[in-house]
Amino acid sequence: MKIKEIQKNAFSMPYSSPSAIKIDYTFRNREYLIINYATNLKTLKEIVPEPLKVVNPIVSFRFIKMPDASGFGSYNTVSQLIEVEYNGKSGLYCHAMYLDNLAPIAAGREIWGFPEKFGKPNLVVDTDTVLGTLKYNSVDVAIGTMGYKYQTLDNKKIKKQFETTPNYLLKIIPDISMDKACLCQLVKYHYKDVKITGAWAGPSALELFEHVLAPVKYLPIVKVVSAQHIVADLTLGFGEIVYDYLQD
C-alpha cells in the first residue's frame, strides 16, 4: 500500500473496514423521552468547557430509541445534555452518553466526538407510562417516567427547536505517548431534515443512582422542570470546529 494511497483513502479506523462510513446518518421513528431538570449551577460551571457559558442550571436527560438508523441498524441511547450559550445564542452541550451498539459508539466518537460509553439503555411504553431506563453493566443508573400522551405539543415548534438549536461536543483524541491530546476541539453540529410525527408533554419523574463509571448523578436533581415524549425522523448533520484548544 503506497503512501499516496493512504493519504487519499484513509478517513476512519480501522483502515481496512472503517467503523464510520461516508453516508448521511438518517434516523427514522427516533423516539425520545426528554426529562429536563434543575441542578447545581456551580457544578455545571466546573464541567462545561470555555468558551461555552452556563447561564441556567438546566440539564436535559434523554432516553432515545433508534429502531432504524442508517449504517447502524437498531439501538438505544441515553444522553445528558446541559443548556449553554455561545456568542449569546442558546445551545446544548453533550456531557455524557451511553449506547448499546458498538458501531455508533466508534463512529460517533471518531467523527463528531460524542462522549459515548457502552451501557444498557431502554425506552418502552409500560402500560400507561413512558419508561426510560439505563443500566451500566448490571447496575441501575437512571429511571425516568412520564404519563403517556397527556398533552399534545405543536409539531412545528418542536421541529424548529431541533433544527435551530446548536449542539456542542468536546472532541478529544489522545496522542500515542498519552502525555497529551493530539486533537482537542470544541465542535458544533445541527440536526437537519427533521420531521416530527408526534410530540407530547406530561407529568414526569427521574431518579439517578451513584455509579463510579457512569457518574450521571454527579449532576444531581434539584427539581424536575418538564418532560416531552417525541417521535421524529431526522438526519444527524456533520459538524464544524468552533474552537481548537491546541492552537490557542
Image (cartoon, rainbow, N blue to C red):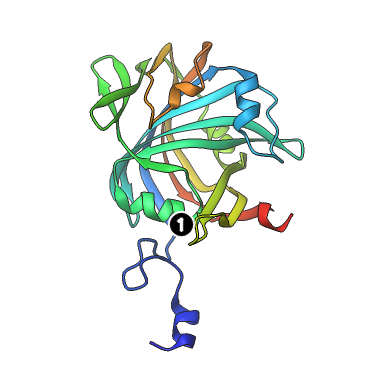
Which quadrant: the N terminus?
bottom left
- For the question of whether residue 162 can be seen, the reply is yes
Kindly indicate the quadrant of the structure image that contains residue 182: bottom right
Is residue 231 rendered to the left or right of residue 247? left
| Three-letter code, disc 1 | Glu
Is residue 82 rendered to the left or right of residue 205? right
- Callout 1 crowding tier (Cα within 10 Å): few <14, some 14–19, many ≥20: some
- For the question of whether residue 228 can be seen, the reply is no
State the residue in front, 81 or 234: 81
Q: How many marks?
A: 1
Is residue 188 rendered to the left or right of residue 99? right
Residue name at image x 27 percent, y 23 percent: 125
Q: On screen, 142 above or below 23?
A: above
Q: Position of residue 172 (x, y in %)?
A: 54, 51
Residue name at image x 46 percent, y 57 percent: 110
The secondary structure type at the circle numbered 1 is: helix
Which quadrant: the C terminus?
bottom right
Kindly indicate the quadrant of the structure image that contains residue 231: top left
Q: Position of residue 39 (x, y in %)?
A: 56, 17
Q: On screen, 208 above or below 154?
A: above
State the residue in front, 244 or 160: 244
Residue picked out by circle 1: 110
Q: Position of residue 5 (x, y in %)?
A: 44, 85
Residue name at image x 53 percent, y 11 percent: 222
